[in-house]
Image (spheres, rainbow, N blue to C red):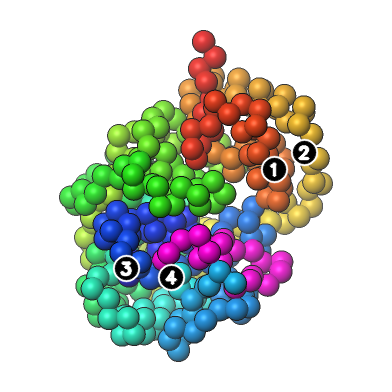
Amino acid sequence: MIVAAGGGGDAVAAAMLDAALYGGETPAVVLTYAWDCLLIDPVPGPRGPANFTGLRPLTRSVQTVPADATPIAPAGSTLPRLAAELPQTFALIDPHHGAEGMVRQLEEIVHYLEPDSVDLLDVGGDILAQGDEPTLRSPLADALTLAACCELNFPVRLLVAGPGLDGEIPADALHDRMGPVALRLTAEHVTPVSSVLEWHPSEATAMLAATARGARGLCEVRDAGLPVPLTDEGPLVYEADLDEALNRNQLARAILATENLHQVEQHSREICGFSEIDYERNKASWLGSRPVQKLDPEAILHQLDEFETHARSRGITHTTFRRLTEAFGLSGQQRQDLRALLLSSRPEQYQAPLWHIPSGA
């Protein structure tokens, strides 16, 4: 069983890790949030069971998300499509009853499955944060899963894939917080999820896959254009000490006894200075008031030329389709149309699943 610390992107990485570590002969159950970026789900925060139809009960408080499950509009979710394309079973973490509720969910699923192992996976390494780092952007989901896993009466192995690739805690700052390397991902390990990476919006997992395939350079991500180095360390998966992570993570310790998501958010505001769900609320309000831009091919390619010229001046070698979508003022529904346009116009710049920015020399 694999617990994906940060939601949809980590769930894709969990499927990759399952095949790499365990051979994929008996696909794992992946316990994950239904928490996608606003390009996919315009409703801020994570979804719970009440936001879906077609879920299937696994235990009293844990349900799986099959391929025919449907998020109830206006909510969106990548989980049903993941279930359709990947062999793993995706079970829904419901964080709305706080860390105590998540402990109950974990206890039930472990009792039901009797798994050989439980891995807690985080892409990027912000689960190893203290909580006061100025570059921290999304501590809440990771802190919740860390707190719940530490309360579980079952051995849990903490794995960090692609240190620094989430753009939050730099890889250099994580070195003394991690243990030995458990695995180096290769292009072969990416193959089981290659079709998913063609449409899934996760930037950290996209960069994890790209570095496993050999991409190196500097990738610009998110609406703010954050530069993330693509290095030889990108495809590494490290083990880390679970208890040490809890002792370090101020937010995870503070929320151990929480019974609802509102309490978790308040602790995040007090310790980290913000709640990432507040950020999503503000951004959703802004996006909702913005007029939808028409996807005009000629205008888009002109915008792309300008974007790449400025990106080259910043030393950027790659970017994501999510970054381009937001930079061009397009909606989430237009992201795949943008991708199709760029791939048909300049296929030589596609270094799956990233967009390569040539040097211009």
4 or 1: tag closer to the N-terminus = 4
Spot occupied by residue 7 in the image (x, y as percentages of width and height): 47, 61
Question: Residue at the location (50% across, 65% down)?
Answer: 83
Quarter location, residue 30: bottom left
The residue positioned farthest toward the bottom in the image shown: 60
Amino acid type at image mark 1:
Asp
CA distance for labels 4 and 1:
29 Å
Q: Is residue 215 visible?
A: yes
Residue picked out by circle 4: 89
Q: Nearer the viewer, residue 242 or 194?
A: 194
Element type at marker 4?
strand
Asked if the residue under mark 1 is in contact with the one under mark 2, i.e. CB atoms within 8 Å, the reply is: yes
Is 208 situated left or right of 279 in this image?
A: left
Spot occupied by residue 99 in the image (x, y as percentages of width and height): 41, 76
2 or 1: tag closer to the N-terminus = 2
Element type at marker 3?
loop
Element type at marker 1?
helix
Mark 4 surroundings within 10 Å by alpha-carbon count, few (fewer than 14), some (14 through 19), many (20 or more): many
The residue positioned farthest toward the front in the image shown: 25
Q: Which mark is residue 295?
A: 2
Residue picked out by circle 3: 26
Q: Is residue 314 visible?
A: no
CA distance for labels 3 and 4:
10 Å
Residue interval drawn in magenta: 69-89
Is 148 situated left or right of 219 in this image?
A: left
Mark 2 surroundings within 10 Å by alpha-carbon count, few (fewer than 14), some (14 through 19), many (20 or more): some
Amino acid type at image mark 3:
Thr
Asked if the residue under mark 1 is in contact with the one under mark 4, i.e. CB atoms within 8 Å, the reply is: no
Question: Residue at the location (44% across, 83% down)?
Answer: 58
Asked if the residue under mark 2 is in contact with the one under mark 4, i.e. CB atoms within 8 Å, the reply is: no
